[in-house]
Amino acid sequence: MPAPDPTPRHGISEVSAISGLSAHTLRWYERIGLLEPVDRSHAGQRRYSDADLARLAFLTKLRLTGMPVADMVRYVELLRAGDGTRAERRDLLVAHREEVRQRLADLHATLAVIDKKIDHYGGSDHPVPGETTTSDHSAQDRKSA
């Protein structure tokens, strides 16, 4: 896969719309080092490249999976340090993947509890065969929230 084009051509409004990140967040990402210093137009407006967009897409995925910003900064620092840090970058991502997998397992278990509660209630016009009466439900509901 070819490297993304490094030519600065996208304004902050366009990048905000593409990435889903606010202009404030984009400026903050630059300030804390998640993005390289962004080129400026002759009028001083930020101009982002396709390479910046590619990095933002990856960073957005990391945030979506719950990676702390400090770990994202560490990853980018390692990336800047060069190929000698490939193993450290991989280790950081492997550890994060395990955290994501654990959260997914927790969410699946929680979803099963919610599904069971939904099944317990059945539909108001669709009683579940073999279910107990409404008064029995009320007592059970108080016990299990």
Image (spheres, rainbow, N blue to C red):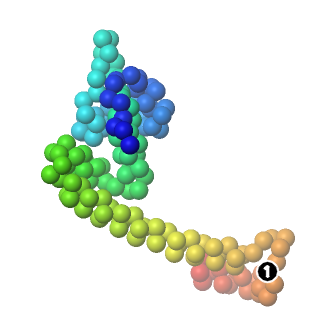
Where 96 sits versus 23, above or below? below
Image location of residue 102, percent across then percent down: 40, 70
Residue visible at 25% across and 34% down? Answer: 36
Query: What residue sits right under mark 1 in the picture?
Result: 128
Q: Is residue 142 left or right of residue 57?
A: right
**Secondary structure beneath label 1:** loop
Q: Is residue 42 left or right of residue 102?
A: left
**How crowded is the residue under tag 1: few (<14 C-alpha within 10 Å), some, or many (20+)?**
few
User: Can see residue 133?
Assistant: no
Total number of numbered discs in the rendering: 1
Q: Nearer the viewer, residue 108 or 41?
A: 41
Residue visible at 32% across and 15% down? Answer: 41
Q: Nearer the viewer, residue 6 or 110?
A: 6
Image location of residue 91, percent across then percent down: 24, 62
Image location of residue 46, percent across then percent down: 33, 22
Image location of residue 75, percent across then percent down: 24, 50
Tag 1: amino acid: Val
Where 48 sits versus 20, above or below? above
Residue visible at 72% across and 82% down? Answer: 137
Quadrant of the frame with the C terminus? bottom right
Q: Nearer the viewer, residue 18 or 69?
A: 18
Q: Quadrant of residue 82?
A: top left
Q: Quadrant of residue 135?
A: bottom right
User: Can see residue 95?
Assistant: yes
Residue visible at 52% across and 71% down? Answer: 108
Q: Quadrant of residue 23?
A: top left
Q: Residue furthest front?
A: 1
Where 25 sits versus 94, above or below? above
